[in-house]
Amino acid sequence: MPLEDRTARLTVLIDPRKKALLERICAEQDTTPSQVVRQLIRRYIEDQTGMPWSPEEPDVVEQRAGKRS
């Protein structure tokens, strides 16, 4: 899966115990919490828009999502 060209920071506050468990599981699976969160966000976007994720500009995705109504 190609990496997007640009990135933006998202700060998420979670329970320290959940963070520790997430980090431990990620280490066991040779991944990072950031990779897991990006995957969850892509899946959420796909579920909400009914379309596969594409790294197009957000306004294009929003226009397409509006057409599904």
Image (spheres, helix red, strand yellow):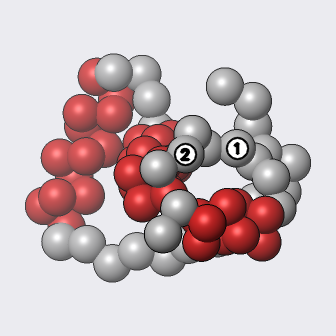
Residue 16 picture location, percent across and down? 19, 67
Q: Is residue 58 left or right of residue 51?
A: right
Where residue 8 is drawn, which disc sits there?
none
The relative height of residue 10 versus residue 3 in the rendered view (above or below) is below
Q: Nearer the viewer, residue 15 or 50?
A: 50
Q: Nearer the viewer, residue 24 or 46?
A: 46
Distance from disc 1 to disc 2, alpha carbons, whole Å, reads 9 Å
Could you tell me which quadrant the N terminus lies in? top right
The relative height of residue 13 versus residue 2 in the rendered view (above or below) is below
Identity of the residue drawn at 42% across and 60% down: 48
Q: Is residue 33 visible?
A: no
Q: Is residue 67 visible?
A: yes
Q: Residues within 10 Å of mark 2 (few under 14, many from 20)?
A: some
Q: Residues within 10 Å of mark 1 (few under 14, many from 20)?
A: few
Label 1: element kind: loop
The mark tally for this picture is 2
Identity of the residue drawn at 43% across and 46% down: 43
The relative height of residue 24 versus residue 12 in the rendered view (above or below) is above
Q: Is residue 36 left or right of residue 55?
A: left
Identity of the residue drawn at 59% across and 72% down: 66
In the rendered structure, are the residues bearing label 1 and label 2 in contact, judged by CB atoms less than 8 Å apart?
yes
Q: Is residue 32 left or right of residue 52?
A: left
For badge 1, the amino acid type reads: Ser
Residue 28 picture location, percent across and down? 28, 22
Identity of the residue drawn at 55% across and 45% down: 51
Q: Nearer the viewer, residue 33 or 53?
A: 53
For badge 2, the amino acid type reads: Met
Q: Which residue is mark 1?
A: 54
Residue 63 picture location, percent across and down? 71, 70
Q: Which residue is mark 2?
A: 51
